[in-house]
Image (cartoon, helix red, strand yellow):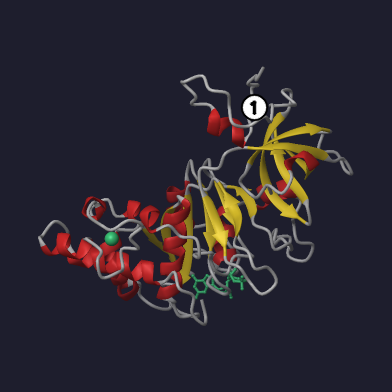
Amino acid sequence: MRRYGKHTDEDDIRSRPNRKGNRPRTNIRPKHEDAAEGMVLTVDRGRLTCLVDGRAVTAMKARELGRKAAVVGDRVALVGDLSGAKDTLARIVRIGERNSVLRRTADDDDPFERVVVANADQLAIVTALADPEPRPRLIDRCLVAAYDGGLEPLLVLTKSDLAPPEKLLELYGELDIPYVVTSREELYDADGGVVGGAAADRVRTHLAGRTTAFVGHSGVGKTTLVNALVPEERRRLTGHVNAVTGRGRHTTTSALALPLGGADGWLIDTPGVRSFGLHHVDPSRVIHAFPDLEPGTADCPRACGHDEPDCALDAWVAEGHADPARLASLRRLLATRERREGD
Ligand SMILES: Nc1nc2c(ncn2[C@@H]2O[C@H](COP(=O)(O)OP(=O)(O)OP(=O)(O)O)[C@@H](O)[C@H]2O)c(=O)[nH]1
Ligand SMILES: [Zn+2]
């Protein structure tokens, strides 16, 4: 007999709407019904730091989970020593169903695209307006990764003291993406210390009550921003406070979930994500972000990539059902799936 405990694992959740009363396809019974719930904050060489009842608990994946990996943001069920005391180790016995995924790209060391962040609601794409120059193609790739993974994008444009945002924003006007512009004066006090001023407040209003993954390539000011949004004492939760700066720069390549200061919500810093896995992007998921175009795909051939000659969108848009500029934007995004030098 199958029993549903308080906590169910991924497979249970999938097979629950079972009105016909068929036998569930899986024979994995929920064990460990007394397991505690937690959220993965960071991962370091197989050790996962999980938040359980406000405590940071170090855990390992139970062998019974097989190849399934828990990643930052995952909701997990844990058993064993949950005290969070030094040198204790709990076990993760279940990983909850994910409602979003952010995949990093395959790289030279690892031929697989891998999920690096789970369950984030939003993807903050941090781009400097100058120094380094904005890379629109990279932004577009981030957008595709967000739409495909089920995250809502947010553009964070830093260093507006060096260059104005208008030209870059023009590229995204048709996409109607929320954005925030920040500058040095609004982040620093007179001594050069980060005070978390007006710019941080503006960013925070977009993060309140949500979980936001932050991505951005080197030098764009992501760390500066994260430091302004997460007060130092909150960063201690995961124990990743850098001995030199005390600013909580963490040293692993894993993402790191941090509780937002000044509002509810989580910020997931992703030091390791330089590019995204777009190999498995499903155009039909990307087109969900274009509800004005979606009805026009009704006459598309099966598995249409929406950028091929017999795509029905061309005729549909030509008939005046939607703005051609929107179709052009969709196609521009879809075209970034192919990797190029520098992505
Ligand atoms: N002019 C200007 N400089 C800024 C601003 N924000 C950050 N910086 C500077 O830009 C440089 C990079 O900032 P970081 O916060 O370290 O950038 P990062 O994106 O974390 O980059 P990595 O440390 O390489 O990962 C630093 O010298 C910051 O002082 C800004 O709004 N305006
Ligand atoms: Zn099509």
* Location of ligand 2 given as a quarter of the image: bottom left
38 over 288 or under it: above or below: above
Quarter of image, res 312? bottom left
Measured as percent of width and height from the top left, residue 82 is found at: 80, 33
User: Residue at position x 59%, y 53% from top?
Assistant: 117
Tell me the element at label 1. Answer: loop
26 over 108 or under it: above or below: above
User: Residue at position x 53%, y 63% from top?
Assistant: 215
Left or right position of 215 against 319: right
In the image, 270 versus 14, the foreground residue is 14
Measured as percent of width and height from the top left, residue 201 is found at: 46, 53
Measured as percent of width and height from the top left, residue 341 is found at: 51, 82
In the image, 265 versus 271, the foreground residue is 271
Measured as percent of width and height from the top left, residue 104 is found at: 58, 63
In the image, 256 versus 151, the foreground residue is 151
Residue type highlighted by circle 1: His
Mark 1 crowdedness (10 Å alpha carbons): few <14, some 14-19, many ≥20: many
Q: Which quadrant is the N terminus positioned in?
A: top right
Queried on whether the Cβ of the residue with tag 1 lies below 8 angstroms from ligand 1, the answer reads no
284 over 56 or under it: above or below: below
Quarter of image, res 332? bottom left
Quarter of image, res 81? top right
User: Residue at position x 13%, y 56% from top?
Assistant: 321
Disc 1 marks which residue? 7
Marks counted in the figure total 1
In the image, 68 versus 48, the foreground residue is 68
**Residue 175: in sight, yes or no?**
yes
Left or right position of 22 against 294: right
